Image (cartoon, grey):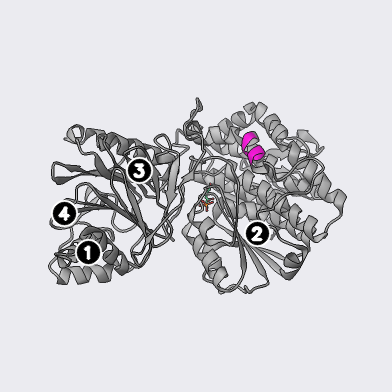
Amino acid sequence: MCGIVGYIGTKKASPILIDGLLKLEYRGYDSAGISTMEHGYLSNMKDKGRVKNLYNLEGIDSLEGTIGIAHTRWATHGKPAKENSHPHMDNSNSFSVVHNGIIENYQELREFLTNNGYHFLSQTDTEIIPNLIHYYYTKLEGSNDKFLQAVHQACGDLKGSYAIEVLCKDEPETMIVARKDSPLVIGVGKEENYVSSDIPAILSYTKDFYLLNDGDLAKLSNTDISFYDSSLTPITKELKNIDWDVSACEKDGYEDFMLKEIYEQPKSIRETIGSRLKKNEKVNFEDIGFTKETLSKFNKIYLVACGTAMHAGLAVKPLLERLCHIPVIVDIASEFRYREPLIDANTLCIYISQSGETADTIAALKLSKKQGATTIAISNVIGSSITREADFTIYTHAGPEIAVASTKAYTSQITLLTLLTLYFAEVSESAPTDVISDIKDELLLLPEKITEVLKDDSKIKEFAHKVYEEKDIFFLGRGTDYTVSMEASLKLKEISYIHSEAYAAGELKHGPIALIENGITVIGILTDPTLVEKSVSNLQEVITRGAKTLIVTNQEINQTNYDEVITIPNTNPFISPILSIIPLQLFSYYISKEKGLDVDKPRNLAKSVTVE
Ligand code: F6R
């Protein structure tokens, strides 16, 4: 989705802004632009298309300003076009604004401004913001801190979500930023400050960050940053050091971020486990600190998320129910929030979000808090919005995930949720210790076993080469293997644009088998020893009807029945999704490469979905 970068300091701003935008490309976008302060006027350069197109814009090289704002846009209101790209300016070219989010009452505000003599050049909701600021600014003649006050008053009129950066022609040494329900961070340098919607965009310049909360505003100069809450009362903020490695945001010799992130999984799982699990010790979630009494109060657990993060919830539901004897409902955040879910003080709601900025997941969390539930956020991004709303936060520590298609975050989410399940079971003494111990031992072995899976991807690559021109590919599995099928199918759709469905193998005969015809590709996942025979029978049914099959398994099966078999190491069936998804992540990757597609930035998709 849209990305924001800002710079105020002593260096030429435009190269820093463009560099930041390039690092935000992974979020998905359709146009880009920058605005800088040039000898008393505001320049504004933008166009639809790629960030690198900005280099071709006439005059871009001669921008000398040391203060500027920049944006990548993912169209919501108005098609991708130069006039709809950000920055947007007011009618008098006194204010320049970039905006992430959606202004829900923009029609009403546009009408108000039109009635007050303003006109509009774009179809965007954003263009009302600089004009609204101008409207208030002119009314504040003679007041102190007009710029800050005008932005504050304009924000007061906005309904919806926003992260904005604002420049004012008459106050050339100041930038004002504000946020509500859309991320924004400020990076601190020496005699310079940076702003961004995402930490990786400015991580090569600083590791010291201030995180804005909903409703906060900040006024920046080269050397100062003042913070205000939503009533414009000055507030103080804690400076946070984010110790992500800059190289973690680079490709490090890999052709694509997705491939790099797939190969990083031994490391990311190790980081997720961190100090929470040590051999022969109890699982450590001191930061949550639930007692047996607290846990006994919960009569239901919700796992709520979107997309891949929701699939991580599905993968862990069976274990959570088995070990803790509490009903677990996995729900899609965008459905949950509008369904009046049955939540009260006896409900535990766990929200899973790599970015921590997914609008539906945040809204679902707020709803459950209002209804008295205890909330836990699982996120990969330190200080992200979801972590600031939840009662408790636990981080996956998978390192920055840049490719739009989530890979290492998914396996880290399953790992962390499994650890949390074991912790609940240990605290509430709800499961036999040998069952818990076996899963703990297997978790500690995961990094090595993932390395083994990644050792040789040649069979996967070959199979991808055979089937990349297919129109439909099906995935089958039972139990946790079915949950992996769903994730594998989503991955394939996202980056290869091949139509794909995942079915619970036992459901085949209830309809989907009608789709099976000669030559169709079916991928089976067989890792649960209690279900393997049943899945084998279902696969036989599709083979009989002419399907080509690829099997991912750690079970002893008659391999000659299938076109290709990928053998993965054995593990406890409850955590096998962490291993079985890996060849299938690679499968999607190689299909996408065979088709010559942009693996890291698939069409129409954004890394973090900050609007509904
Ligand atoms: C798929 C993918 C998406 C995200 C979903 C939730 O590869 O990345 O389905 O999982 O948009 O995003 P987060 O986890 O950031 O809330």
> Is residue 506 something that shows in the picture?
no
Residue position for label 4: 94
Mark 1 and mark 4 lie on one chain; the one further toward the N terminus is: 4
* Residue type marked 1: Leu
Residue 598 appears at what percent x and percent y?
A: 44, 36
Residue position for label 2: 511
* Residue type marked 3: Tyr
Label number found at residue 132 = 1
Marks 2 and 3: CB-CB under 8 Å? Answer: no
Ligand 1 neighbours mark 4 (CB distance < 8 Å): no
Mark 2 and mark 3 lie on one chain; the one further toward the N terminus is: 3
Which region is colored magenta?
Answer: 267-271
Residue 317 appears at what percent x and percent y?
A: 70, 57
160 is within the stretch colored magenta: no
How far apart marks 4 and 2 lie (CA) works out to: 62 Å
How far apart marks 1 and 3 lie (CA) works out to: 25 Å
How far apart marks 1 and 2 lie (CA) works out to: 56 Å
Marks 4 and 3: CB-CB under 8 Å? Answer: no
Image point (22%, 33%), residue name: 56
Foreground residue, 455 or 177?
177
Marks 1 and 4: CB-CB under 8 Å? Answer: no
How far apart marks 4 and 3 lie (CA) works out to: 22 Å
Mark 1 and mark 2 lie on one chain; the one further toward the N terminus is: 1
Mark 4 and mark 2 lie on one chain; the one further toward the N terminus is: 4
* Residue type marked 4: Ser
Mark 4 and mark 3 lie on one chain; the one further toward the N terminus is: 4
